[in-house]
Image (spheres, rainbow, N blue to C red):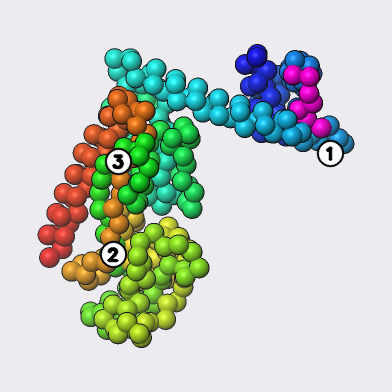
Amino acid sequence: MDWNQLRVFATVAEVGSFTGAGKVLNLSQSAVSRQIGALEAALGLMLFRRHASGIILTEPGTELQVAVQDMSSRLALALSRINEYREQPEGPLRITSSVTFGSGWLSARMNHFLEQYPDVSVSLLLVDNLELDLSQGQADVAIRFDRQTQPNLVQRKLMTIHYHIFASSEYLAEYGTPITTADLDSHRLIVYGDDVQAPVQNINWLLNEGRPKNDPREPALRVNSVYGIYRAVCSGLGIAALPYYLSEEAPNLVELFPQITGPSIDAYFVYPEELRHSKRIDVLREFLLAEVKDYRSKITSRNVDAS
């Protein structure tokens, strides 16, 4: 089968039109149509149904689309493995993680990584509520927040993330600084929403800190993402529990009750067994471990200075 025809077919199936596929592939609509026509003639089947509002895949077309997607994933994985035979780490490196961690901690360190390894082309794939499948080649490496159980994945603990209590300096100037946890009763608290899966257990511990478990405080605002909580705190809306790595991004955040530590979550560096000997993954792992060590040192120093 002509791979070029399959590539054109996959693009048409994804975009949903010959004209749109032509723009993606830098081909004319007639060239795209000829490629699809030749592929349909070779197979003796129609792959698309044409109608006034566009095109849709036929049942054989859907089958072929799944097969081509699988072929593309396997080819990408093979090319990744071939790249590892070079002397220096180079080539594409796709890293997936959560939106909050990827935006707040990981992306801030990619500049230093690319300075050290300019021939590595990094793509950050940041998603929530959906884990990209490493075994299917959807990403090369992941930062995950629970221990993986799949036998074909290699994992190493990267760090433990702790939650602490923060408010903005503007909020404290207007509403005062709580001295004891009992003072939180008279402050506006921002917590995670009840209707979505929280990133850690007991994420809303602040509602019960210093109070009986059966008598929690009433929050001023519920948000369904840690990043949303962070933005609300930065705006001066109230007090919330946040991971340290987010507080680094906002100089106006003030830590309250530093002696109190909330729940924690472990982050793992994960990649497929097939890439165990990847130079790109090796250097990324060692780079991130060094960054974590430096990060811990800064937090320890900051806590000592605060005390």
In the rendered image, residue 47 lying in the magenta stretch gets the answer: yes
Q: Looking at this view, is 124 or 116 the one in front?
A: 124
Q: Residue at x 68, y 17 (%)?
A: 5
| Stretch of the chain drawn in magenta | 43-49
**Residue 170 in view:** no
Element at badge 1?
loop
Are discs 1 and 3 less than 8 Å apart at CB? no
Residue 53, numbered label: 1
Residue where numbered disc 3 is placed: 155
Amino acid on which disc 2 is placed: Pro
Q: Residue at x 67, y 28 (%)?
A: 64
Query: What x and y, as percent, mark residue 119?
Result: 36, 21
Measure how far apart labels 3 and 2 are at the Cα level.
22 Å
Q: Earlier in the sequence, mark 1 or mark 2?
A: 1
* Apparent side of residue 20 relative to residue 3 in the rendered image (left or right): right
Element at badge 2?
loop
Amino acid on which disc 3 is placed: Gln
Q: Earlier in the sequence, mark 3 or mark 2?
A: 3
Q: Looking at this view, is 164 or 49 the one in front?
A: 49
Residue 263, numbered label: 2
> Dot 3 surroundings within 10 Å: few (below 14), some, or many (20 or more)?
many
> Dot 1 surroundings within 10 Å: few (below 14), some, or many (20 or more)?
few
In the rendered image, which quarter contains the C terminus? bottom left
Query: What x and y, as percent, mark residue 262?
Result: 27, 67
Of marks 3 and 2, the one in the foreground: 3
Displayed quadrant of residue 111:
top left
